[in-house]
Each structure stands twice: as structure tokens, then as C-alpha cells.
């Protein structure tokens, strides 16, 4: 147990300092291995690498297709086009809500959250400028729309968290719709009310919109019609959930539709595919490195004790699942990484508990996805660092807002759905 704890401490500390998890994870894993009684080189070359390679083998096609889909939406202007029409409908007077909903539509349609950040930021600048809202609230709004309810809670989402939970627990992306919608409402309404309160507080303190050096207005003249952006998003969700196609087939249909609707931009396609492919390799290596760490943790004798502690907490096993996944997501700075580590090790135990206690596996699915978005957005999270860099702001400027909408409120949502799932609501 001590070896696992020390390994986690090293992982969290080095990740928080900004070091790359691709080398941080094996270093932390070797600490666990040595103190846990495993042979060092075998632990690295076999146990750790088996976990890393196994995850990459299983999930690389989805990472690749998802990244290419997102880059195609971005480079053709479809993502911006959809975002602009939503902003126009909602109006600049509700600039924060317009940004949140724009992010939510894109992420629920399967666009990578990193792509969403880049696509929505210029639009957010326009809306906040018109509404005279401080730029400090842009990261919070983007994080709420892209990093929370569409990523973890809404049933049918093609985002990775939902797909990982489905594979480990034998469920589908539509698992536990009632719990998912309840969690999504808590996160959306709670987050929006918080950001609205913050807007009023900062305005009263004299905070207003301030320009940035490279600011420029996004024109409509070069953007394709928004309907051509909506169709691929809807197609991905429908083929995944209604026709129950494999995820890569559903995302592949979205890519084909983008190509068909934007054939005049064919010169951009190779660039989008190249960029998406490159991005997918880095993304899956980051997550696979975290999974390799989990494989070593699972191999040390102390893991059996840890498992017994988690499963012997008393009450509903949904509680131990939520705690394990939330903790590991926070440790790795990755919602998908933390959830994969936990489910790789404990999914069979949770399914046994589900059968013994007459709790639906779907409830475990939705608790797992929502819990993965509880502490994943701590300050060392790569998505948070990227978001702040794109917005040209610092942790001091905006992290409090990000932390509330992506950590505090989602944890409240987890508590609610754990309670409801434990009494049979799915």
C-alpha cells in the first residue's frame, strides 16, 4: 500500500510541475515496483509496457478517427460556423451561455475538446467584447461547455470517457439516461449560475473587457453554411446510438460527410489528416502511459489490500467506484486515464458487486464517467494548461472559475447520482 501511495505522490507532484506524463508515469511506476517487491526491469519492460501497448492497441483507431474528425471540422470552418449560428441565436447579451452551448454542441457531436477550445476562443472574444465581460471568464465558460456534462454525463456522447466505460462494463453509450441527464443538468445549471454570479461580481469590482494583441473579428464570408456542420455532428450521434455502429464507423461517417460537403476545400484535407494523426499519437501516448502505471500498481501485492479497502467500504459499491476513479483521474490529470486505470483493475469486481446487490451495470457506467470528470481538471491537467494558454491568461486569472465548474460542481453531481443509483434509478 505504501509503495502505491508513494508512486501516486510522485506522479501527482511531477505532473503538477508540468513534466510530461510519458516519462513521469514510468518513473512513478518503477517506484511502485521496487518498493512493492517487483523486479525492476521486468516491471518496466513487461508489466508496464504490456499495459501501455494493450491500451494503445485497443483504442488507437478511435483516437485517430476522433482527432481527424475534429481537425476536419476545424480546418474547413464548420466548427466555427456552427458556433457562430448558435451564438447569434442565443445573443451576445447571454455571451457566457452562448459560449457554453456552442462548446457543448460540438463536443456532444464528437469534436475533440482541444479542437473546441481553439474553435470557440475567437468567437468568445467577439461575444465578450460586445457584452463587455472580462476575458477572465472565457476559460470557465469553455471548460463548462467542453470539459463537463457533454464529456461525461449526457447519454449517447461519443466522447472517449463514455466509450471506455461501455467497453469495460459491457454497456452502451446510452447507459443510464436518467442518471446521466440529472448529472448533466446539475453541471450545466450550477456552472452557468456560478459564472453569471461571477460576471456580476467582477463587473461590480470594475472589471471590463480588455483587448488582446492578436485580436481580430471572425468574418462569415469564408465560412461554409452552418447546416453542413450540424449534419456530420448529428450523424455521428445517431449512427453510434440509434444504429449502434462501432465508434470508428460512426465517426468515419462524420468524416465522409465533411469531405462531401466541402469538396472544394480538398487541398486542406491532407493537412487536417496529418495534424489529426499527429495529435492522436500524442494523446493516446499520454493516456497509455497512465494506464501502464496502473498495470504496475495492479501487479504489486499491496494492490489486493487496496482493492479490499475500496470494496470493503460498506454501503453501495458505487461509492468506492466514484472515489477510486475521481482520485485516480486527479492523480493523472486525465479523466480517461484515471477511469481506465480503475476499471482495468476493478471492473470485474464492480460487475460482481452489481450482480450480488442487484445494481444495474448501467449505474456503474454513468457513475464512472461522471466521477472521471471530478478531479481531472486540477491545475496540472493538460487540457486546463492548454485552455489558459490559448486564452492568454494565467491560473491566477481564471483557475478558480475552471475549478468550480469542472471539479466542485461535478463532484456534487457524482454524489447525487451515486445516491440515486444505489436505490435502483438508472
Image (cartoon, rainbow, N blue to C red):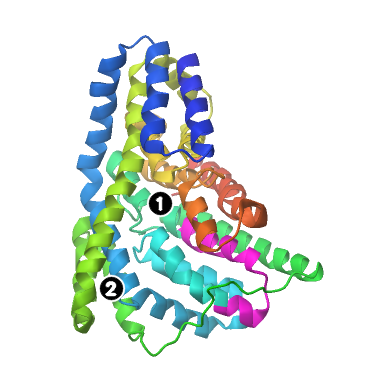
Tell me which numbered mark, 1 or 2, is placed earlier along the sequence.
1
- Seen at 23% across and 80% down, the residue is 265
Find the residue positioned furthest to the bottom: 221
In the image, is residue 372 part of the stretch drawn in magenta? no
Residue 138 falls inside the magenta stretch: yes
Marks 1/2: CA–CA distance: 25 Å
Residue closer to the observer: 107 or 165 = 107
Residue 308 seen in this snapshot: yes
At x 24%, y 55%, the residue is 64
Residue 43: percent from left, percent from top: 29, 18
Residue farthest along the top direction in this orientation: 37
Residue 74 or 257: which is nearer the viewer?
A: 74
Side of 56 where 131 appears, left or right: right
Give the farthest residue toward the right: 205
SS type, badge 1: loop
Q: Main secondary structure of the magenta part?
A: helix
Number of residues whose C-alpha sits closer than 10 Å to that of mark 1, classed few (under 14), some (14–19) or many (20 or more): many
Residue 83 drawn above or below residue 295: below
Q: Mark 2, residues whose alpha carbon is within 10 Å: few (<14), some, or many (≥20)?
A: many
- Tags 1 and 2 touching, CB below 8 Å: no
Residue, disc 2: 232
Q: Quadrant of residue 20?
A: top left
Q: Is residue 43 above or below residue 281?
A: above
- Answer above or below: position of 334 versus 70: above
The image position of residue 284, as x and y in percent, is 30, 45
Residue found at x 57% / y 43%: 415
Residue 135 x/y as whole percent: 63, 68
Q: Which residue is mark 1?
A: 176
Q: Residue at x 37, y 49 (%)?
A: 161
- The residue stretch that appears in magenta: 126-149
Amino acid at each position: 500500500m505504501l509503495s502505491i501511495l508513494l508512486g501516486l505522490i510522485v506522479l501527482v507532484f511531477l505532473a503538477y510541475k508540468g513534466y510530461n506524463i510519458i516519462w513521469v508515469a514510468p518513473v512513478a511506476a518503477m517506484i511502485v515496483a521496487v518498493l512493492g517487491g517487483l523486479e525492476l526491469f521486468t516491471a518496466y519492460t513487461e508489466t508496464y509496457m504490456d499495459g501501455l501497448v494493450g491500451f494503445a492497441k485497443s483504442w488507437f483507431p478511435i483516437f485517430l478517427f476522433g482527432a481527424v474528425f475534429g481537425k476536419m471540422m476545424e480546418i474547413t470552418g464548420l466548427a466555427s460556423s456552427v458556433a457562430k449560428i448558435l451564438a447569434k441565436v442565443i445573443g451576445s447579451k447571454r455571451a457566457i451561455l452562448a459560449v457554453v452551448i456552442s462548446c457543448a454542441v460540438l463536443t456532444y457531436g464528437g469534436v475533440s475538446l482541444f479542437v473546441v477550445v481553439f474553435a470557440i476562443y475567437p468567437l468568445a472574444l467577439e461575444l465578450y467584447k460586445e457584452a463587455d465581460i472580462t476575458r477572465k471568464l472565457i476559460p470557465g465558460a469553455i471548460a463548462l461547455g467542453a470539459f463537463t456534462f457533454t464529456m461525461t454525463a449526457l447519454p449517447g456522447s461519443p466522447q472517449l470517457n463514455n466509450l471506455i466505460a461501455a467497453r469495460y462494463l459491457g454497456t452502451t453509450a446510452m447507459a443510464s439516461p436518467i442518471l446521466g441527464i440529472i448529472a448533466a443538468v446539475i453541471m450545466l445549471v450550477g456552472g452557468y449560475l456560478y459564472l453569471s454570479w461571477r460576471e456580476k461580481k467582477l463587473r461590480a469590482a470594475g472589471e471590463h473587457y480588455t483587448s488582446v494583441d492578436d485580436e481580430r473579428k471572425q468574418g462569415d464570408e469564408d465560412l461554409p453554411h452552418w447546416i453542413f456542420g450540424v449534419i456530420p455532428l448529428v450523424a455521428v450521434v445517431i449512427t453510434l446510438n440509434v444504429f449502434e455502429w462501432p465508434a470508428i464507423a460512426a465517426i468515419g461517417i462524420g468524416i465522409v460527410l465533411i469531405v462531401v460537403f466541402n469538396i472544394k476545400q480538398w487541398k486542406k484535407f491532407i493537412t487536417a489528416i496529418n495534424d489529426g494523426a499527429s495529435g492522436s499519437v500524442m494523446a493516446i501516448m499520454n493516456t497509455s502511459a497512465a494506464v501502464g502505471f496502473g498495470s504496475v500498481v495492479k501487479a504489486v501485492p499491496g494492490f489486493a489490500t487496496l482493492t479490499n479497502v475500496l470494496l470493503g467500504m460498506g454501503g453501495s459499491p458505487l461509492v468506492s467506484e466514484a472515489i477510486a476513479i475521481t482520485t485516480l483521474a486527479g492523480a493523472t490529470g486525465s479523466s480517461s486515464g484515471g477511469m481506465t486505470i480503475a476499471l482495468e483493475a476493478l471492473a470485474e469486481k464492480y460487475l460482481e458487486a452489481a450482480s450480488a446487490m442487484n445494481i444495474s451495470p448501467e449505474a456503474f457506467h454513468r457513475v464512472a464517467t461522471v466521477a472521471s470528470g471530478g478531479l481531472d481538471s486540477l491545475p496540472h491537467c493538460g487540457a486546463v494548461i492548454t485552455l489558459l494558454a490559448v486564452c492568454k491568461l494565467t491560473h491566477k486569472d481564471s483557475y478558480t472559475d475552471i475549478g468550480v465548474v469542472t471539479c466542485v460542481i461535478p463532484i456534487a453531481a457524482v454524489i447525487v447520482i451515486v445516491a440515486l443509483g444505489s436505490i435502483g434509478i438508472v
